[in-house]
Image (cartoon, rainbow, N blue to C red):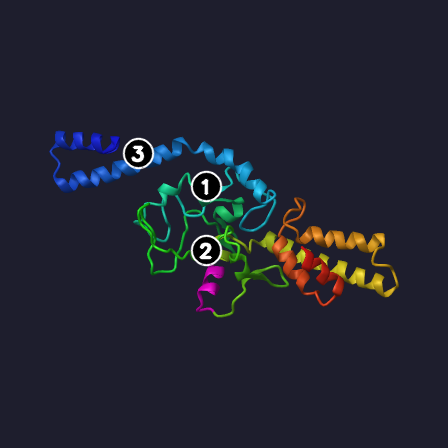
Amino acid sequence: MDAAEIATNAKADEKGWDAQKRAEQIAIEKVKARKKAISAKSNVWSLLSDILAKRSYGKCWYCESNELRSDNPIDHFRPKGKVAECPDHPGYWWLAFEWSNYRYACTYCNSRRVEVETAGGKQDHFPVFTPPDWNRSKDDNNAEKPKLLDPSDEDDYKLLTFNKNGEACPNCSDEDSEDYQKAKESIDKYHLNHEPTKKARKAIRQRIKQIIANTNKLLEDGVDMKSIQIKSNKKELIKMIRPSCTTTKFNTAAKLYLREFEDNAWVKEILDRD
């Protein structure tokens, strides 16, 4: 019996509450005590932000932007306080301090933004494919199937692609499939088609096209592949697709765009080695 339950039982005895009233109040007080305890230790997430940032070279785990504008960029993949899609869910409070539940997120992926054409932000959202149901306590062991892409899953990114206008799209065309729905839901919740983000991806594709055209023209003119000009072009492409480069962003989109030109042997060589 914890402190909240002891205090509530004492109050119940004093006021003569029946068993139902007593149980309801104990549940309420336990939630309050739990939230207070979590809040009291919330500074740990700020301390962890630099550690998590290093894992992605300072880029948001959801969108790969390196323009983080959040005071607290730690997102709980399974929300700790409540679940928007399940009003009676207490939140994954037992994962509040579980490091494997943390994701490094920018403001636009983690907070709601409303624009003319798009709105998004993960916040307390955690949709799942049911059945099975959500896990509601640390003792539940349902094999949850999140309807959101998880950046810590090495295969999830394959469910996304990007069109010529810089727009994130499901990689699967079957709208009834879980893969399509998971990608579609993630695009919305993570705000992946925020207008400036789309423009930035489109600009990356245009730059890649320019570099490819310039390099091929140099080769046609007889310039050696080891020339400074061509080596510089190749180096820029490598930086654009390499997540470890801290000066570039949206590297997954850049790599997909570069694949459009892999019929060029020198481009395929870059893709194969990276």
Marked residue nearer the N-terminal end (2 or 1): 1
Is 194 on the left-hand or right-hand side of 7? right
Give the number of the disc on residue 211.
none
Q: Quadrant of residue 15?
A: top left
Provide the residue designation for mark 3.
33
Give the total number of marks visible in the rendering: 3
Is 128 on the left-hand or right-hand side of 165? left
Residue 240 can be seen, yes or no: yes
Is 132 on the left-hand or right-hand side of 76? left
The stretch in magenta equals: 175-185
Quadrant of the image containing the N terminus: top left
Q: At which x and y percent is residue 168?
A: 56, 59
Q: At which x and y percent is residue 59?
A: 59, 45
Amino acid type at mark 2: Leu
Give the number of the disc on residue 99.
1
**Residue drawn at (41%, 52%), measured in percent from left and top?**
126
Secondary structure state at the residue bearing disc 2: loop
**Residue drawn at (44%, 69%), measured in percent from left and top?**
176
Provide the residue designation for mark 2.
148
Q: Are marks 1 and 3 in contact (CB under 8 Å)?
A: no
Q: Are marks 2 and 1 in contact (CB under 8 Å)?
A: no
Secondary structure state at the residue bearing disc 1: helix
Marked residue nearer the N-terminal end (3 or 2): 3
Give the CA distance from mark 2 to mark 1: 19 Å
Marked residue nearer the N-terminal end (1 or 3): 3
Amino acid type at mark 3: Ala
